[in-house]
Amino acid sequence: MSWGPFLLRRLAVAVPTLGALSALVFGATELLPGDAVSAIAGPSATEAERDAVRDRLGLDRDPVTRYLEWAGGALRGDLGTAYTGGRAVTELIGSRLPNSLLLAGLALLVTVPVSVTLGLLAGARAGRRSDRVVSTGVLLVAGLPEFVLATVLLWLMAAEADLLPQVSLVPLGGTPLGTPEILVLPVLTLAASGIAVGTRLVRSAGAEVAASPWVEAARLRGIAGTRLAVRHVLPGALAPATQAFGLVSGALVGGAIVVETVFGYPGIGLELQQAVAHRDVPLVQGIALVLCAITLATVLLADIAARALDPRRGSAR
Amino acid sequence: MKPTTGSTVLAEVRGLVVERGVGERPVLDGVDLTLRTGEVLALVGRSGSGKTTLALSLLGRVREGLTLRSGSVRVAGFDPFTPAGRSRVRGRLVGFLGQDPASALNPARRLGSTLREAAALVVPSGRRVPDRAERERRIRAALNEVELPTDPAFLRRYPHQVSGGQAQRLALAVATIGDPRLLVLDEPTSGLDPGLAEDLTARLSERHRQAGGAMLLVSHDRQLIEALADRVLRTEEGRLEPRRRSDTMPRPTPRLASPPEPAGPPLLELDGLRATHGRRVAVEGVSLTVRAGGCTALVGPSGAGKSTVARCLLGLHPSWSGELRLAGAPVPADFRRRTRAQRRALQLVAQDSVAALNPRESVRRALLRPLAEGGNGVLEEEAVRLLERVGLSPVLLGRLPHELSGGERQRVSLARALAASPRVLVCDEVTSALDTETRDSVLELLTELRHTAGLGMVLITHDPEVRAAADRVVTLTEGRVITGEQAATTGGGPR
Amino acid sequence: MRPAFSEGRSRDTSGLLTWCCAGVCLLVLAVAFLGPLLATGSPTEQVGPPFAAPGPGHPLGTDFLGRDVATRLLHGGWVVLALSVGATALATLLGAGAGVWLGLTAERGGEMVMRGVDLLAVFPSLLLLMLLATGAPDNDAAVLLAVGLASTPFSLRVVRAATRQVAGTGYVLTARARGDSWPAVVRYDVLPNIAGTVLADAGIRFVAAVHLTATAGFLGLGRGAPNANWGRMIRENLAGTALNPLPVLLPAALLAAFAVAVNLLADRVAGRMRHFDSARSDS
């Protein structure tokens, strides 16, 4: 199969998936018993005041109609207006998203080389000492919830040692790159959990290849050590590991939300956390939809990268 | 057999003990072996008897899970279990070719890079690193020897872009590029289709005649052993013994005389079967007939759709069309629409004696389940009777499958099928996991059941000797019948 | 199949590690579930100035509202662990039920359903949690549901794969063709042979559930203030680490120790259980 039909087929799955996820996003916030009205009108509001709010927000109409309106708006690039502040949701997202992408990109720059090296070190020598050390270390880090890791890093580096800023304040209108020191802790935390995930994926893909007849044949030809790992195990392990990495990208989106919240980093995750705290339904929906789209795009990109890395493409599947 | 060509000792194994775990029977239990220059030694024996472990020890390799306890190995004076000795031995003094030789090629690397790497490892005439021209010369020579093209376009291909035969020959070239003084061959022809196996056999004997290196051959393949070996030894429970007649299997056409077909009306008839997997047609145009007491063999290479036919007969395949009649009465395609009598009349004895039995179910429950469905009276007695009928002791009732031998498991599987009082047995590769002796005794039992109980039998197999037990043969290739039903007495159609 | 383990020296040291992990788990569980019984004071009563250092009446100091850290620590664990256990049970039951069913029934319909399941698996679990918490604020049931639902697709996929493997074996084919009822096939053939896989998977789901539930507390989702919750304690007291770091460090240490120990333990158990499932058919 050449690239054209491959991409078409993947898109044919991704687009309806995004549609279904949008319904899930809308449904989860709107259909459950809980209601934004009391949050906005306040707990002591009279029934008349609550009615007025409901009327103003259009909440008295049937949810399917409102979903279709919302989804239609989303297609035109209009995600509605935030309850608090009254700014357009797209505008709020647009101002915060670049910061988050920067954070994720930097974390990825650290994650990928470290994961590949550690994963290969463990996978190519599965069952041996180096594998046990790496695997146990990775399990330890993977066991830590991100917010615990972030909090402890924060306490150590900022409060105790006073080395780095505790809160990632960005001057109005500036970018985080203007004050790079605020990026260090968020990137480190995000990379640590990314490495824990990535190393395991590369390791298991590597261990599978290392047990293959062709690697055994290479071993018996006298090839060993780094050469065996890099030239014989890595080429076969890269594609499956990349694809698996795409499938766990949802976990990394979660990590980014937590990290931004802990460090007060002005990204889309912090915005979401605040929107949830304020029950700002349109803003929550808008950000959730964007995050879903990003996750899906990551899966798609990982699929494409995996295919590009696999010399057998075109023969199978 | 040829005389031994050299007299100097090339490789020597003394008192080798390799264990799996503490307290278990050793895989190799004090083995001594001497291999002379230019000699070809074949190792035969049951799987698990340690022959591959012994062969790999010459390369200084002990597989994961095994431990070298004691003993020594020397190849041309080097100890392959030391790092220095290993680097001299592997790929230089000793070459290796394993099961399905083409699988030694890394699917993610180009053919040329695999060859260049192998050539670079070889040390010619004492120099540490051969120069580029020398390397190219070796690559060309190795490719010429196996009659493969040497042009850059060919070498830029990946293994999946060449034919199976080319890939296999390339693997041979990679293994022999340094003209190793010893070639270790670990079941190189097992699982190959006959054409590839013949080609490999011819090339190996040609190579031995021309270059004359020693070989250690682990195999069951009688033809390969006869073409190459000067000496044959048998591994038995971790020790070396002289060979036995039954250790090897011939590859070619059957030699047993087939029984005549019994007379009488057809018991099971299948007409114009067409089965699909999704949109792909898996099997098309298969028809077969079985008479009471008769046996129809369904043969063909793996992947030809034989097991699909079995699933269709039992109504387990989700989408197929064609006519199935049992004693003249039509049987629905889907097992859910069959009556209980129809379901019980056709019984499957499944491929692979291990997966055929539930690993967590005792023999007793495996037999009682179908018996209870049938509503028989004294079930336990019935189960004992069934075990006796397949030649097993009632002591086995309380056992789990992993506590049984391969042959016992196959008999239990058969007893379970008989528990449903079938009229036709569909046997799917029932002997493929068994060694020769056990296989023959299971085949005998099947024949006996046909004659005494008037059972019809569909025997799915790729083994020519099993096929010889049938009175009718249908040959499948890629889902199509290439030779229709024929009486097997004519000697069998093309393979 | 290849041997999954190589025997040898590694067993001894890893055995010790496993026992240590089990000990840590039990200790944290004891603090969480026996804590509310042992605590004498009220977790919401102000006993001193905010962020006071340890002293009489408040042995671990006070938090940002001047409440006793020790009492809040003893009260704040059970909700995190109980919700995790509940969510794991939910995910395992849903996942195993649907997984066995999908693994045994028609191939094509199953593929369609699996597409949908994959879709849910891509959905970031924390996002699902935040969405449901927006829809149903101040509600622990929403946290349990979200955490359980977020784990279900993974459970389902694992159980379905294991079931399909069993469903393709000769003994299941034989039983089906013979006309054995579905309940009999599930009871005798499927369940005994996937039990190890299901248990191993539940361990992995539990690790994820602990993470997610603690994170929910940290983000202030679920039943809100003034109830004690280890996750939320960390967030509430982050500003005062310079004055009294204990209300941040102690719950963080308990959560970290538990999460890490459970993760290591689940990995060991998963290895053993898969080994157990394949050992019999391997011999």
Image (cartoon, coloured by chain):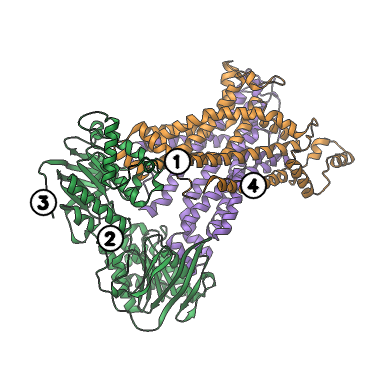
Chain colours: A orange, B green, C purple
Dot 2: chain letter: B
Front one among A38 and A247: A247
Q: Residue furthest front?
A: B151
| Residue at the spot of label 2 | B435
Amino acid on which the number 1 mark rests in the picture = Ala
Between circles 1 and 3, the one closer to the viewer is: 3
Front one among B222 and C226: B222
Q: Secondary structure at mark 3?
A: loop
Amino acid on which the number 4 mark rests in the picture = Thr
Report whether B45 appears left or right of B383. left
| Residue at the spot of label 4 | A17
| Residue at the spot of label 1 | A205
Front one among B182 and A82: B182
| Residue at the spot of label 3 | B3
Residue drawn at x 61%, y 27% as measured from the top left: A102
Amino acid on which the number 2 mark rests in the picture = Asp
Of the image marks 3 and 2, the number of the one nearer the N terminus: 3
In the image, is residue C51 above or below residue A88? above
Dot 3: chain letter: B
> Residue C73 occupies which quadrant of the picture?
top right
How far apart marks 3 and 2 lie (CA) works out to 31 Å
Label 4: few (<14), some (14–19) or many (≥20) C-alpha neighbours in 10 Å: many
Q: Secondary structure at mark 4?
A: helix
Of the image marks 4 and 1, the number of the one nearer the N terminus: 4
Dot 1: chain letter: A
Whether labels 1 and 3 belong to a single chain: the reply is no
How far apart marks 4 and 2 lie (CA) works out to 52 Å
How far apart marks 2 and 1 lie (CA) works out to 35 Å
Residue C91 shows up from this direction? yes
Amino acid on which the number 3 mark rests in the picture = Pro
Between circles 4 and 3, the one closer to the viewer is: 3
Whether labels 3 and 2 belong to a single chain: the reply is yes
